[in-house]
Structure formats: C-alpha cells, structure tokens
Image: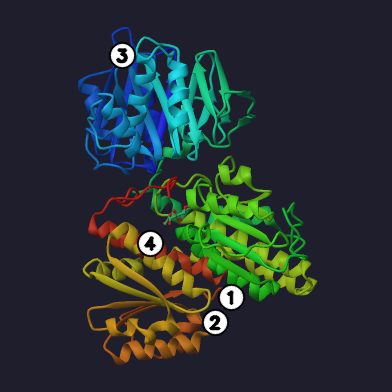
Amino acid sequence: MCGIVGIVGTRPVAPLIVDALKRLEYRGYDSAGVATVSDAGLDRRRAEGKLVNLEKRLADSPLDGTIGIGHTRWATHGVPNETNAHPHFSGDVAVVHNGIIENFAELRDELRTDGYDFASQTDTEVVAHLVSRGMAQGLSPVEAAHAAVRRLEGAFAIAIVFAGEADLIVAARNGPPLAIGHGEGEMFLGSDAIALAPFTSAVTYLEDGDWAVIRRNAFSIFDADGNPVQRERRQATTTAYVVDKGNYRHFMEKEIFEQPEVVSHTLAHYLDFSAGRVRKMDAPFDFATIDRLAISACGTAYLAGVVGKYWFERYARLPVDIDIASEFRYREMPLSAKDAAIFISQSGETADTLASLRYCRQAGMKIGAIVNVRESTIARESDGTFPTLAGPEIGVASTKAFACQLSVLASLAVRAGVVRGVIDAQEEQRLVRQLVEAPRYVNAALKTIDQIERVARELSHVRHVLYLGRDTSYPLAVEGALKLKEISYIHAEGYAAGELKHGPIALIDEDMPVIVVAPHDRVFDKTVSNMQEVAARGGKIILITDEKGAEKAGIETLETIVMPNAPELIAPIVLTVPLQLLAYHTAVLKGTDVDQPRNLAKSVTVE
Ligand code: F6R
C-alpha cells in the first residue's frame, strides 16, 4: 500500500525523502509527492506515476527545507493523478496518509458545512482540513492533530507537518505500520525499516492507537487517550543494500535466482543437517497436544499454507483448516483455545492476515507466524515466530518468500510428525536428508531456462491459460496462474486436475494452453488421465514434470518441461521454479512492468 516518509533533519530533506521513497516504491507507485517546511512556509511537489516523475519535477523546481514528509501512493479513494497525490494541504497543514478512513464521507460533509473546499477525491484530505480547523479554533498544532486523529475511524498511518513549525512532525498509527528512526540530531519516520535503512537502523515502532510528536532531538509517544507510553527501541535487521538489482534486469528475476541460497539459509535455521534432525524449536505451542491447526494467509502466502496443509496432515496426522484470511476473519468459525493457529506473511503487515490473527487471539488460541520481516506487526503480535530467511523481497510478485515459506512448513510438518509420534527417528532422518537436498534441486530447476523461454513465447500470444495439478501440485497450479496473471496480465486459472470435468473442461479448445504440473508422484497416473481428457478435446498441453514423469506420461504435449527427479517432500519447492520463470519470461516478452505490475502493491495494509 502507500509508503510514508518523514524527516526532521539538519540538511535539505527533499532529496533524502525521495531516496527513502524509492525504497518504499514497492508499496505503491500510482503517484508520489513531497512537502517541506521552510522559512517561506509549506511547499510541495507532486507527480502522477512513478517516482522518476517526481524526481524530474524536483530537479526542475527544487524544494528548500530541513523538515518534510513524502508519500508513494496506492490509490484507494480517487484516481491516480496529481491532484489526488499526497501530501494534501489545508491552510498551514500538510498530511500524508496510508490506509482508509472509513468515516471520511461523514467528516467531509461536516467540513463542507463549515466552509472547507475539497481539492481532491481522497479520504486523506479530511485529515488536513480537520487539523486546520482545530488550529483555526485556537488549538496548538499538536493538540489539533491529536483531536483530528481521534475523529478518524478505519486503518491509517499518518504524518503531518505545519507551516511555521520547523521542528515538528506529528505521526499516528492505527493499522498500517509506522516506525520512528533515531538519528544523530535528526529524526526519521517511515512505513518500514527498509525506508529508513540508509539513515539509521535504530527504530521504534508505533503500536495501534499510538500517536507521536517527533522533533530533531526528542520524541514522545502517546496512547489514544493522550497518556505518554514507552515503546521499545529496536535494532532493525534490514540493510541498505536492498535496492540493488545486481546484474539482473528485474528484482523478480534476481529473487528467483536467489532461491537456492535463501532456501538453504532458511532450512539451516530449522534443521540440524549433521544429525539429520529437525531442531527443537522454541515453538509457541506444542504440536503434540493440539487437535487441530488453523492456517490463514493471503495470496501466495495462502497457497504456501495449502501445501502446508497436505504436509501436516500427511506427515504429522494433524488436521489443518486452511483459510484465506479475508474470509476467515468474518466467517464466524468456532475456534477453540485448545487449538493453535499459524499465520503466513512475507511482509508481516497484511491487514486481513493481521485481523485473523487478532481474531484467534481473542479466542485464546496460541499463535505462530511464518514471517519474512522480523520486526513486522504480525511477528510482534504472535506468541512465536517461524522466520523465513529470504531477505528483503522487493519484486511485487512473491517468489523467494514462497519457496522459503514452503521450506519452513515442510520442516515444521516433519517436526510435528516427530513430536506426535507419527515419524520415527529413521524416517525423520530420511525426510531431513530430502530437505537438505532442496537447494541443489532448486538450482538445477533454474537451468531449464531455454525451454521456459520457448513456452513463454507461446504464452505471450494467448489470452487465457489453464493450470492443473493434483495433491501438492494443485496449490502450485493456482500459484502458477496467480504469478502469470499478476505480472503478464494474461487471464489464468488454477484448478485441481480432478475438478476439470466438473466445469472447466468446457473451456478446452485448440486456443487454450493447459499447463499441467505433474511430477511422478502418488497421483501421477490420475493426472495423466486428466491430461488425456484435455488432449481428446484438442487442448494444447504444456507438461511440467520430472524425468520419470516425462518418461511415463505417454502423451503428446506442446512442450514438456523436465525437472530433476526430486523427492516427494521437496518436489513443490522445486516445481515452483519453472512456474515463476514462465510467468517472468512471458511478462518480459509482453513488456509489462514486472517488478511493479499495474494496480498491485507489495504490502497490503488495507482490507
Ligand atoms: C502474489 C503476492 C501476494 C502476496 C499477498 C500476501 O505474488 O505477492 O499474493 O502473497 O499479498 O502478502 P504477505 O505475504 O506480505 O502477507
């Protein structure tokens, strides 16, 4: 979603703000803007589209001032144009905002009645006018900001600066994350530690309901009632290198190719390679004593959870309820304090996943989180975290985080099987040996590039693609379809292969490529039967399989992409790679913006 930056500095801040916004651009890139306070008062530059447009505007017309705020936008209210770009002004007040103000229509009507005109279609502008009205009524800037924030309903992270106040930013958080960065005689504010990494690694996260007064040499945090509160100062693990693509064309490509390394790092955290055991972990609950496990997440992280369900049920005989978080939080599922829940999130900030976590907490459940950003809200609100060691993921389409989520889930499933008495020491060693091999297989999978490029050329001309898979290859098929549609804008559907004849088979004709994910596993023959059904109707099959599967399939395909014969447990981690590469190369051929596809944002902090 939107990204926020604020700096109370000692040097001209506009270029520094733009630098920090570049590191937040993965959150939103519809438009961007900066406002600074100087002796001349408030001033701003805004531009529609990517940050480069804002940079050009600032180069033509620089901004003075050692204090300022900036914003990259992911539109919620109002189309992406310059007028709707933040910061929004009202009198002596400038505001940037991430989130949705749910009662904005009511507030807008009230402010209009009081004579305030609205220049934009955004919900944010009500905040600027509310603060401005408070000041006109005699409140100080800080009092007016606090009074305004108290009127807001919904999810928001806000930063406000004021004309004539060269040493003051007021910030507030209710939902989307906001971190204060501690500098030497300077203070920073950012949507995440990545934005602040070039300036400082010492950060303090605001909690929900907090608001803060930030000055060059001091800051104070208050709860919603205005009582001062202390929040922990942490050392962020994010480093400044993240914006570097290296020799790759896109972050997504780089992140796909990082997978052998990050899968290896992640597995090393969970597995004792030499003993052939899953390490005893500081788990937030005991897999041995729970009757059920609830897993919930969104998008790609959810699909990792679906693979996890198969694994927990198969290897640990532990029943799993898997839910899309936006459904889970409202569907009034009976929950038991005896059960446990795992939430999966790369960013650790996804609004629906966080709300589901809080829902389970209310039911008294113990909560674990598989997260990539260790300082994230989901990590902090869990009883324990199971980190993925993927490093910062910048490409909007999740790739290496998914492979690491699978690595964690596989390790946990084996551990759960051990403590539940389903897996004996010998079997544990066998499965751990398989897991240890995963990075090597992933590396081999990355070498299928020539074939992938051939298939991508084919796909780049079609409008629809169907993906099929069974067992753990079913969620992979859905993930493959998700990757393709989000970055190449080709319509794609992922289906359980057995569901084909219950509807989607009607779509099959010679124009519809059908990508079948089918390693030579326990359900291979069943999937081959489904491929026969497709072939009989003239469908063009692209088979993603392993060497054994390629030998046994006995079916004419447009192309067969052959992966190494990976052991069953790690096959989903390996088969993910061709699906990612296929989507990536198709998108490159179509010339889309791979790292920042239209309409998407990396960290989805609104419902
Ligand atoms: C797809 C993708 C999204 C995310 C989803 C959840 O490539 O990246 O579907 O997986 O928005 O995000 P996190 O994992 O940050 O909770």
List the residue tagged with mark 1. Answer: 568
Secondary structure beneath label 2: loop
Instruction: Return the disc, 4 or 1, that comes first in the chain's sequence.
Output: 4
Determine if the C-beta at disc 4 is less than 8 A from ligand 1.
Answer: yes
**Whole-Å distance between the Cαs marked 4 and 3?**
43 Å
Relative image position of residue 604 (x, y in whole percent): 43, 48
List the residue tagged with mark 4. Answer: 483
Q: Is residue 20 left or right of residue 380?
A: left
**Whole-Å distance between the Cαs marked 4 and 1?**
23 Å
Relative image position of residue 217 (x, y in whole percent): 54, 13
Residue 521, label in figure: 2
Q: Is residue 215 above or below residue 123?
A: above
Question: Which quadrant of the figure contains the N terminus?
Answer: top left
Residues at circles 2 and 3 in contact by the CB criterion of under 8 Å:
no
From the image, state whether disc 1 or disc 3 is nearer to you: 3
Q: Is residue 554 left or right of residue 125?
A: right
Picture quadrant where residue 338 is located: bottom right
Residues at circles 2 and 1 in contact by the CB criterion of under 8 Å:
yes
Instruction: Return the disc, 2 or 3, that comes first in the chain's sequence.
Output: 3
